[in-house]
C-alpha cells in the first residue's frame, strides 16, 4: 500500500475529520471566551473589588520602580504579571464550565438505546436429552 493511499485513508477517517472540526471550533470559541473574560467579566470584577484593572497588576522583580506596566515592559524589567495570570485562570474556568455544560446537555439528549428483548436461549443438548428421558419414563 502506498504512502499516499495510507495517508488518504487515515485523513478521511471520521474521527480525524471530527477532531479537525473540533479544533477549529474550539479556536473560535477560545477567542469568544477570551473577549468575554477580558471585556466583560474582569472589568465588572475589578469594579466590584474597587476599580482594579487586573491586566495591569504586576510585581516588579527589578530594583528600579516604574509607574506603569507598559513603562516597565519597555525598560525590559523582570516582571511577575499576576494580573494576566488571573485573567488566564478565569478564561480556563469559563471554558471548562462551558465544556462541562455542553457535554452534560449532549448526554441528556443522547437517546438511550432500548434494551434488547430477552431471547430465550435454546437449552443445552444434555438438558433436552434428560427431559426426553424423564418424559419417556413418565409414560
Image (cartoon, helix red, strand yellow):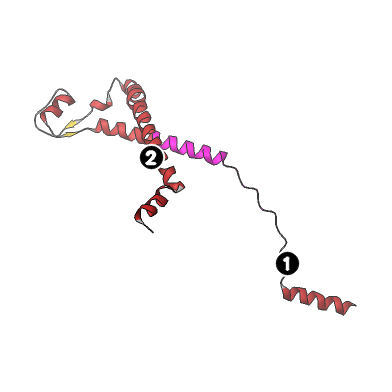
Q: Is residue 101 left or right of residue 26?
A: right
Task: Indicate whether residue 28 is drawn in magenta.
Answer: no
Question: Which span is picked out in magenta?
Answer: 94-117
Secondary structure at badge 1 equals: loop
Report which quarter residue 131 is drawn in: bottom right
The residue identified by callout 2 is 23
Secondary structure at badge 2 equals: helix
Q: Which quarter of the rendering shows the C terminus?
A: bottom right
Numbered disc total: 2
Main SS of residues in magenta: helix
The residue identified by callout 1 is 122
Q: Residue at x 13, y 27 (%)?
A: 74
Q: Is the residue 110 above or below the residue 5 in the image? A: above
Q: Is the residue 39 above or below the residue 30 in the image? A: above
Q: Residue at x 32, y 20 (%)?
A: 47
The numbered mark at residue 92 is none
Residue 31 x/y as whole percent:
35, 30
Q: Which quarter of the rendering shows the N terminus?
A: bottom left
Of residue 12 and residue 76, the one placed in the foreground of this image is 12
Task: Indicate whether residue 111 is drawn in magenta.
Answer: yes
Report which quarter residue 126 is drawn in: bottom right
Amino acid at each position: 500500500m502506498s504512502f499516499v493511499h495510507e495517508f488518504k485513508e487515515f485523513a478521511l477517517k471520521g474521527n480525524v475529520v471530527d477532531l479537525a472540526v473540533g479544533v477549529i471550533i474550539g479556536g473560535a470559541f477560545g477567542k469568544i471566551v477570551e473577549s468575554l473574560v477580558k471585556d466583560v467579566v474582569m472589568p465588572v470584577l475589578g469594579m466590584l473589588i474597587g476599580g482594579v484593572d487586573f491586566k495591569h497588576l504586576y510585581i516588579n522583580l527589578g530594583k528600579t520602580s516604574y509607574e506603569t506596566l507598559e513603562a516597565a515592559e519597555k525598560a525590559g524589567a523582570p516582571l511577575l504579571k499576576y494580573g494576566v495570570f488571573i485573567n488566564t485562570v478565569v478564561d480556563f474556568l469559563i471554558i471548562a464550565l462551558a465544556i462541562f455544560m455542553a457535554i452534560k446537555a449532549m448526554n441528556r439528549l443522547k437517546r438511550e438505546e432500548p434494551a434488547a428483548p430477552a431471547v430465550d436461549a435454546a437449552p443445552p443438548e444434555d438438558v433436552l436429552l434428560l427431559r426426553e428421558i424423564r418424559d419417556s419414563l413418565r409414560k
